[in-house]
Amino acid sequence: MVRVTRLRAAEEPASSDPLERPAVWPGSHEPRGATWSPESTNFAVFAPDATAVEVSLFDEDGREARCRLPEQTLGVWHGAVPGLPVGQRYGFRADGPWSPAHGRVFNKAKLLVDPYARAITTPLPQSQMEYADCVYGYVRSGLPPARYAERDDRDSAPHVPKSLVVHDDFDWGDDQPPAVSWTDTVVYELHVKGFTKRLTSLPKELRGTYAGLGSPEATGYLGDLGVTTVELLPVHQFLTEPGVAARGQRNYWGYNSLGWFAPHGAYCSTGDTGGQVREFKQMVKALHAAGLEVVLDVVYNHTAEGGYVGPTLSLRGLDERGYYKRANPGWDPTAYLDVTGCGNTLDATHPPALRLVLDSLRYWVTEMHVDGFRFDLASALARTDASVDLRGSFLSAIGQDPVLRNVKLIAEPWDATGEGYLVGRFPPPFVEWNDRYRDTVRDFWRAASRGVQDVATRLSGSSDLYADDGRAPYASVNFVTAHDGFTLRDLVSYNHKHNEVNGELNRDGTDHNRSWNCGVEGATDDPDVLALRRRQTANLMATLCLSTGVPMLSMGDERGRTQGGNNNAYVVDDETSWLDWSDAGWLDLLELTRAALRLRREHLTLRQRHFFAGRPPRDGALPDLAWLHSRGTGMTLDDWHDPGLHTVGMFVSGESLRGRGPRGEAQRDASFLLWFHAGSTSTHVRIPRRRQLLRGEVVLSTDPAHAVGTSVEGGTRLPLDGRSVLVLRSR
């Protein structure tokens, strides 16, 4: 801590005597945040309407010294404090007009987290944060105020996280991103804590941490599974929402960001004292060494400050009028536009807000070496005023950015409103989560679809959504489950959600699960029901892994992970949400997943770069794709419109690949015939007598009667058990 004559305890009222402060030099307005050097630490924060800004410095006992930033340049207050150590705790205090009716709510009694902080402490214990009244900028009367007028002058510092001065000289060595093409990508969505918290082969202190995820046990498992890219649920420093904290719970998923530069401190094995930056980098380096990309699920659409009457933690106290969108900006600055369902929406058209997001994204790429991002509720960011604008500032800025346009960018193409649903419409370089795939595949395997036309479209890459504007099949990130909703095992075990533990009277979470419990709700000892559930999970997993597009698996689905029917476990931070590595009852599903992903990896036929044309690419060749009726003939128009049809064959020719090799050469591969039978009773399928299928072998099957390796002759009429997948490879 810098030496001062007197430090004031944070909880004491301010003295009328002037506080002797450290010297403060003018410093620079760039870069923003806290920039350390052996000589001084430069502080720079954007607060254009503030009349003064102080940086508060804290020692380990919470004692505080305030230093007024002496300069303002282009709306940025700045100053350099000499002699500060790495790890110094700090925050900002912004003074200025208190005029809620005009969107100005400055309050120097409120300690503010640096929006550019590279590391942030967590209030301990977090469960006691309870959002004490003093963290709100206004006097809370006990009534739910639509507006607030009286400023609360109590000091919030004891209850607010502290920013940390970071200077990390991490040695990346020869770290290189795997640079997996989209065509070869297989995404695995996981929670940093939940993935290894129950992995007993790790030392206890590493479980549930960045170090645990970067361990050989974790990286080896992911590599052996066959995925190429881990998508981490939010790792930006986040807080628990006030309502959740009041119930004695905590936010587990992390979709409530406080700092967009800081790795979440609770996932650090050594605590949140600054080591989280180095440990995160070491994790990325280890994942890269194992051939795995790292994609972050990022939440820029809203912040942890919530609605207009929420706490004052960071942006609200610096430029509340600029950072948050208004529903009625012309006459009612207190009416936030909330298209996120979380109380506020970041105004990404406001240049400083847009810069904050872009600076954060570039930081994670250049300094933390991540390989891409999945944007939560991306439609909320793509709004100009209140309207969605796909040519607006956010998407345009990313598309032309020389750093960001070259990493993986995944949009969740909707927000909390109907007009925000934009599946199939996000422009390159974005690809999209495709919920149309999810819904169609779920309906097909529970025999709730009207025929096979829709599922055939999803199996072949969703050309109806992505081919009309020149995109490729990899624009569709296919998924059957994700963190939000049932796990794969629960999808076949529950018809209804069971979210009572969430504390919201089972009213949270969707009621439209498109699930089927196979005849019994929840746990059962019935061997027939259990066998059917296992087959259904295998069918869904095989379909996902072998569909054209980019498959995304959800953590633990390949091992039969269950949440007991909870389809919204965002506050469930216990064994319910953590992956149970000791459960060996679903290892057959794990082996099927590995086999399906291995087939995909080894065969270009099963990971096409171009959309199918349904016709030969050259004279004398077979069509690149042919759809077959169970009788072994091509599908007719009547077949496509038969609502009772639940069986379809998909023949993909390896001799008719449309992609070219690196030197323009024609490529060839094995041909495959995939049968998908969702009917409840057994049927027969006929193998066409074609040159490419005069002889084949079973390479994947969920029907026990057809073992892998079994030879099949063209013209054969095969029995196929109810609800099964059969994959044949030509010899």
Image (cartoon, rainbow, N blue to C red):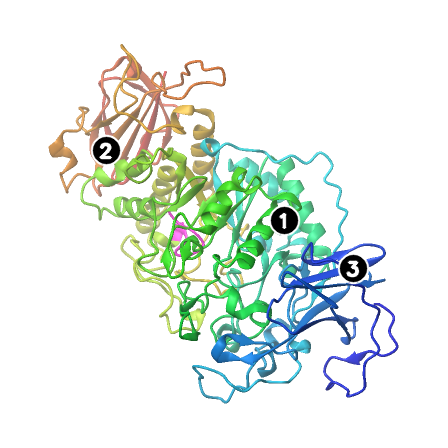
Please tell me whether mark 3 or mark 1 is closer to you in this view. Answer: 3
The answer to which of 230 and 372 lies nearer the viewer is 372
Find disc 2 in the rendering and name its residue: 648
Discs 2/1, front: 1
**Residue 104 image position (x, y, % from top left):** 54, 75
Element under label 1? helix
Labelled pair 2, 1 in contact (Cβ < 8 Å): no
Residue that appears at 52% across and 78% down: 246
Residue 216 counted in the magenta span:
no
484 magenta-colored: yes
**Amino acid beneath label 2:** Val
User: Does label 2 or label 1 sit earlier along the sequence?
Assistant: 1
User: Which residue in the structure is indicated by mark 1?
Assistant: 363
Q: Is residue 455 above or below residue 44?
A: above
Question: Eyeballing the image, is 143 above or below 196?
Answer: below
Name the spot of residue 132 as percent of width and height, x first.
Answer: 59, 81
Q: Nearer the viewer, mark 2 or mark 3?
A: 3
Give 594 or 30, whichever is nearer the viewer.
Answer: 30
381 left or right of 234 in image: left
